[in-house]
Structure formats: structure tokens, C-alpha cells
């Protein structure tokens, strides 16, 4: 048995005495405070040992009690009288005590059944339909865009339907989002249209914020409070702590809006992860860190990325309330993020949620993941722990969904995506002169003026006579003429 200091635990719904928490099965039959495991074998996913139907946050509260380590005797004595009185050096290497790992909260089992004792987050049929449609839209878009990429037109990343849609649904529409690149579903949830997705991926004249100058899936939309994705990993993490702080200092958003920051477990190996959590820890702000632990950073499995208990174990080190959730259970993600958001606002402090999933897709369209993992592992995961199927089974059990609805939805989504794709193909690129705009505010700097003039000169000379240039210019709105004005 692991010992657990009751003081550091708080739960949503039912209270739970964790002092008799079992380290092996996770089931404490006396108080019913733990879980049974019926998910897939955990060999390929070393951080998961137990599922838990209680939403238990590991509190990062010690600093708030005014007894920080290194500040007086009280802190040194805390929780460790033996060491203080008997001179016993107790080494520790687990957040939960003993050798037990941080539990993973879930609501639905692998078959879409509500786990006995689990509290369902408040949702009705219409909301469930919206969740499901958005989850189904992601793979539909993926299939079309994947094929488009194979024709050499774009490149693309996707995945993690339950984590992305469940969290999007738990946030307010004007919470500020700082994402990594797999979070297109958050935008779709907020009303970003399929045409907008196509415009960004094709870089056409309707690509509102990027104007075709960004890599595919590097979305950004001020209207949807979605900060533009940047390619270097983890830069969004310290930025999010800054955005959270700015929200706290803005009177009409304080106590109302949070910054929500998504990142992969791989990005959490960057220094920026630690800088970001440190910033949010010492300059408190309503910043919600959502770690998507999908088991891989391109070809590097999580087993080679860290030696600790996933990403969640790092939260308490920064005094940040933390919870680990089954990222393939949309209802668990919804409940966990709702509670995490509430804590961010009530305490004006950061919260960390680690969502556990498995990246069934290749890393991106440039990757062939079967070079570093067996095809059977992926096929098994698709069948055993499919987030869309789990939620579909739940909806069917409620009488909210059936085979006809499924057929209709799939046909409709495919038609919508194909229509948007065909339309995007016919659109031109943004005006060529946009190449020189937007990087600098105010007057255009001299070197850009020079470059613009040089390109205009070349266009005048070769634009209408040199066939490859003429063909290329025809792809731009105004055929590049705006540069000649
Ligand atoms: C600073 C930096 N280093 C390396 C890369 C190349 N790179 C792009 S995605 C990626 C893997 C990221 O893995 P993870 O954070 O787990 O996200 P996932 O793709 O699994 O969602 C790497 C190494 C990069 N974009 N930026
Ligand atoms: Mg990853």
C-alpha cells in the first residue's frame, strides 16, 4: 500500500480517503475509491497503470500555505517528522508516494459504459451530438487532406479527437488558445468553417490571417481567440503564461477568461516548458496547460523521452494543481477541463492536465510510422481504444444515436469536406504584394522597400514573356499586377 497525505488531495463529487490507496490494482474495495483496469495492455504505454473514476487533482498548494521549503523550520518538518527527529534520510521518487503512479481519471470504459460510481458531466443530447459530429469531422478532413497531400498539394497533421473536442467544449469561446498543431478541432468547435481550414491548408486568397505565408495547419484566428501556431516546439508555453497574466490584468477579462495552452509530451522536453510553468507558478495567472501525451514525439516513444511519471508529475514541483485524464474518453476530458478551468479562475493560478492517448496516425504526412512501430500495435489501438467508437457506444446506450444517424452523418461530412476541397482548389493565392506586408507595423522598412522594388523590376522584365513565370503569376490574385502599381 502506498501512503498518501490526505491534505494534498481534493476531489470533484465524492470524497475519497486516499491513505489506503492500493498501488497494484488501484481498487480499494473498502471505500470504493479507485479503479479497475479494462483498457488495453499497458506495455506500449508505460505511464498508465490505473484508471480512476474520481476527478482527483494533485494539489500544488504548499507554497500557498506560506511554508515553502527553505523558508524556516516548519517546512522542513512538514510530512516528515521521522526525518526531522530521527535523522532518517527519506529519498522519494513518486508524486503519489511509495511506488504508485498518478492515476488516470475516466468516465467511460473501453466499451462506452459509464464506470460504476463515475459522475457524468452535464451534457444533453444536442450537446452530445455536437461533440460527436466534431469528433467525426476530424478524421473525415484528415482522409481528404491526406489524399490531397499525396498529390503533392499540402502537408497535414491531425489526431486525438476526444482530447481536442472534449477540451474545446469545456472552454469558453473567448478563452485564449495557444496550440501546437494538432488542435484544429478547437477552431472547428468555435465555428471556424471547413472552407477556412481548406483556405489555410491551400494558402489561398481566403486564408485570412496567414495569407498563404504559413505552413499548412499553422492556423491563427483573432476572431476565434486562437493564437497563430508557430513551428518551433514549446514556444507557446511561456507565451501562454504571459497571455494568462495579461488576462488577469485586463479588468473586463479578469475572473472571466483563461489562457489554454496545448502541447505534446515531446514539446514538454523543451526548456520552454519549464520556463512557462515556472512563470505561471511564480507570477500566478489563469493559465491552463493541457499536455497531450500521445506516446510519441515523431519516432521517439515516450518511454525514451522521460524517466519520470509522465508530464503530470512535474506540475506539483511547480506548485500547480494537476490531474491526469484518459484522453480517449471525451466525457472525462470534458469534466476534467471544466473543473481545471474553474480552478484557474477561482484561484487565479495555473492548472496542468495531462491527457493520455495514443497517436494512431503517422506523425504527419511526411512520416511513415511503420518504420519504428509495428502495424499491428496501431491496428490494435484503433480497435481497442478508439475515442470516437467509445463515445458512439455511450450515445447509443442513451438512445441518442443509431446506425442510420451514423450513415447520414458520415455522408454529410464527406460531402461538406469534398465541396470545400474542390472550391479551395479553384481559388487563387493572395496578392503577391502580400509577401512584403504584416511583418512590421508602421512604415515599411527600407530593406523591404528595396526587395519589393527589385521583384517588381524583374516582373516588368520577364513576367509576361518568360513562360514559367507567366504560369506561376497566374496563380496569384491579380496575376501579380498589384506589385507593378
Ligand atoms: C524546437 C523544435 N525542435 C524540433 C522540432 C521538430 N518537431 C516537430 S514536431 C516534433 C515532435 C513533437 O512531439 P510532441 O510534442 O509529442 O507532439 P505530437 O506530434 O506527438 O502531437 C518535433 C521533434 C520543432 N518543430 N521544433
Ligand atoms: Mg506526442
Image (cartoon, helix red, strand yellow):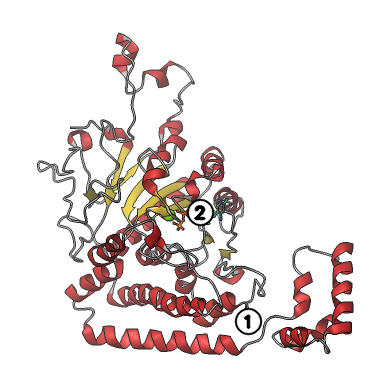
Determine whether 235 is above or below 410 in the image.
above
Picture disc at residue 359: none
List x then y, in percent, for residue 245.
58, 49
Residue drawn at the location 18% of the way across and 65% of the way down: 111
**Left or right: 222 as drawn, with respect to 318:** right
Distance from disc 2 to disc 1, alpha carbons, whole Å, reads 35 Å
List x then y, in percent, for residue 371.
39, 59
List x then y, in percent, for residue 468.
74, 84
Question: Contact (CB < 8 A) between labels 2 and 1?
Answer: no
Residue drawn at the location 46% of the way across and 28% of the way down: 66
List x then y, in percent, for residue 249.
61, 50
Give the SS element for disc 1. loop
In the image, the residue with mark 1 has its CB under 8 Å from the nearest atom of ligand 1: no
**Left or right: 235 as drawn, with respect to 482:** left
Total label count? 2
Give the SS element for disc 2. loop
Residue bearing mark 1:
206
**Left or right: 21 as drawn, with respect to 414:** left
Determine whether 59 is above or below 341 in the image.
above
Determine whether 139 is above or below 439 in the image.
below
Residue drawn at the location 51% of the way across and 76% of the way down: 149
Q: Earlier in the sequence, mark 2 or mark 1?
A: 1
Residue bearing mark 2:
255
**Residue 485 visible in the snapshot:** no
Looking at the figure, which quarter contains the N terminus? Answer: top left
> Is 209 in front, or is 475?
475
Mark 2 against mark 1, which lies toward the viewer?
A: 1
Determine whether 106 is above or below 195 in the image.
above
Within the image, what quadrant is residue 217 found in? bottom right
Amino acid at each position: 500500500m502506498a501512503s498518501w497525505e490526505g491534505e494534498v488531495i481534493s476531489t470533484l463529487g465524492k470524497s475519497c480517503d486516499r491513505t489506503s490507496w492500493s498501488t497494484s490494482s488501484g481498487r480499494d474495495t473498502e471505500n470504493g475509491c479507485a479503479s479497475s483496469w479494462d483498457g488495453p495492455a499497458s506495455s506500449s504505454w508505460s505511464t498508465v497503470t490505473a484508471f480512476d473514476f474520481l476527478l482527483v487533482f494533485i494539489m500544488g498548494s504548499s507554497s500557498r500555505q506560506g511554508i515553502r521549503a527553505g523558508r524556516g523550520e516548519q517546512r522542513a518538518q512538514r510530512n516528515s517528522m521521522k526525518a526531522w527527529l530521527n535523522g532518517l534520510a527519506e529519498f522519494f521518487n513518486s508524486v503519489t508516494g511509495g511506488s504508485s503512479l498518478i492515476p488516470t481519471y475516466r468516465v467511460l470504459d473501453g466499451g462506452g459504459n459509464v464506470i460504476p460510481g463515475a459522475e457524468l458531466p452535464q451534457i444533453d443530447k444536442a450537446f452530445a451530438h455536437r461533440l460527436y459530429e466534431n469528433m467525426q469531422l476530424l478524421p473525415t478532413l484528415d482522409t481528404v487532406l491526406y489524399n490531397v497531400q499525396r498529390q503533392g498539394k499540402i502537408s497535414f497533421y491531425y489526431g486525438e479527437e476526444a482530447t481536442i473536442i472534449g477540451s474545446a467544449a469545456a472552454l469558453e469561446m473567448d478563452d485564449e488558445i495557444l496550440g501546437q498543431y494538432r488542435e484544429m478541432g478547437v477552431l472547428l468547435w468555435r465555428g471556424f468553417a471547413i472552407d477556412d481550414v481548406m483556405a489555410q491548408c491551400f494558402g489561398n486568397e481566403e486564408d485570412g490571417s496567414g495569407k498563404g505565408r504559413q505552413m499548412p495547419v499553422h492556423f491563427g484566428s483573432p476572431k476565434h481567440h486562437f493564437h497563430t501556431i508557430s513551428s518551433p516546439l514549446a514556444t507557446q508555453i511561456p507565451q501562454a503564461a504571459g497571455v494568462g497574466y495579461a488576462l488577469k490584468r485586463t479588468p473586463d477579462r479578469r475572473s472571466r477568461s483563461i489562457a489554454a495552452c496545448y502541447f505534446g509530451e515531446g514539446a514538454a522536453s523543451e526548456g520552454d516548458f519549464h520556463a512557462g510553468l515556472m512563470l505561471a507558478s511564480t507570477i500566478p495567472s489563469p493559465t491552463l496547460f493541457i499536455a497531450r501525451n500521445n506516446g510519441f514525439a515523431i519516432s521517439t516513444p515516450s518511454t525514451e523521452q522521460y524517466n519520470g511519471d509522465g508530464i503530470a508529475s512535474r506540475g506539483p514541483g511547480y506548485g500547480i494543481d494537476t490531474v491526469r485524464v484518459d484522453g480517449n474518453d471525451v466525457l472525462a476530458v470534458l469534466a476534467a477541463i471544466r473543473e481545471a478551468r474553474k480552478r484557474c479562475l477561482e484561484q487565479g493560478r495555473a492548472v496542468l492536465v495531462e491527457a493520455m492517448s495514443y497517436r494512431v496516425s503517422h506523425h504527419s504526412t511526411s512520416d511513415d510510422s511503420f518504420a519504428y512501430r509495428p502495424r499491428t500495435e496501431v491496428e490494435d489501438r484503433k480497435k481497442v481504444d478508439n475515442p470516437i467508437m467509445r463515445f458512439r457506444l455511450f450515445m447509443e446506450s442513451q438512445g441518442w444515436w443509431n446506425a442510420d444517424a451514423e450513415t447520414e452523418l458520415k455522408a454529410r461530412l464527406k460531402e461538406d469536406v469534398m465541396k470545400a476541397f474542390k472550391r479551395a482548389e479553384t481559388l487563387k493565392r493572395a496578392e503577391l504584394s502580400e509577401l512584403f506586408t504584416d511583418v512590421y507595423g508602421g512604415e515599411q522598412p527600407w530593406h523591404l522597400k528595396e526587395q519589393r522594388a527589385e521583384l517588381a523590376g524583374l516582373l516588368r522584365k520577364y513576367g509576361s514573356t518568360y513562360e514559367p513565370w507567366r504560369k506561376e503569376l497566374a496563380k496569384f490574385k491579380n496575376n501579380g499586377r498589384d506589385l507593378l502599381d
